[in-house]
Amino acid sequence: QVQLVESGGGLVQPGESLRLSCAASGFILSSYVMRWYRQAPGKERELVAVIASIGGNTNYADSVKGRFTISRDNAKNTVYLQMRNLKPEDTAVYYCNAFRVATRDNRWGQGTQVTVSS
C-alpha cells in the first residue's frame, strides 16, 4: 500500500521538544522533495519546512527558524521534523508531503496533532 504515515505528535508544555516522523511505504522517499505543513484551527495550511530530494538543502518558515529541523533518513525511508522550544502558537495538525518533480506525484499523510499548552 502506498502511503505516508506521520507519528510523534502529542501534548507538550511550552519550551519542550517533539520529534515527528513521516514514514513512507510503497514508494521510495529519496526521489521526493519532502515538506512538513501545519494547519491550526481556523487557519490555512502553512508550509513549515522543506528538504530537497538531492543535496539535502533545507528551508524553513520564519516562525520556526532556529527551533525546527527537518531531516531525512533514506535508508529508513523516513523524514523527521525535530521541534524544539515549542510555543503555544505551534499548536496544529502537522502533515507530511512528498512531491516528485519528474512525475508531479504528490502524496500526503493523514496528519498528527501537536498541542503546546501549559
Image: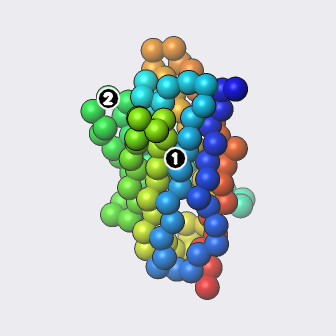
| Left or right: residue 92 compared with residue 19 | right
Depth check: 38 or 75 in front? 75
Looking at this view, name the residue that lies furthest to the bottom: 118
Q: Using the image, tell me which numbered label, if any, was put on residue 88.
A: none
Discs 2/1, front: 2
Looking at this view, name the residue that lies furthest to the top: 103
Depth check: 43 or 35 in front? 35
Q: What whole-number distance in Å separates the C-alpha atoms at marks 2 and 1?
A: 17 Å
| Left or right: residue 107 compared with residue 71 | right
What residue do we see at 64% from left, 72% from top? Answer: 11
Question: Residue tagged by mark 1?
Answer: 36
| Residue 63 at least partly seen | no
Q: Considering the image in quadrants, where does the N terminus appear?
A: top right
Q: Amino acid at mark 2?
A: Ile
What residue do we see at 45% from left, 63% from top? Answer: 83
**Quarter of image, res 10:** bottom right
Q: Are marks 2 and 1 in contact (CB under 8 Å)?
A: no
Q: Amino acid at mark 1?
A: Trp
Q: Earlier in the sequence, mark 2 or mark 1?
A: 1
Question: Residue tagged by mark 2?
Answer: 54
Give residue 31's position: percent from left, percent from top.
43, 24
What residue do we see at 53% from left, 32% from top? Answer: 98
How many circles with numbers are drawn on the protein? 2
| Left or right: residue 33 compared with residue 43 | left
What residue do we see at 48% from left, 76% from top? Answer: 16
Looking at this view, name the residue that lies furthest to the left: 55
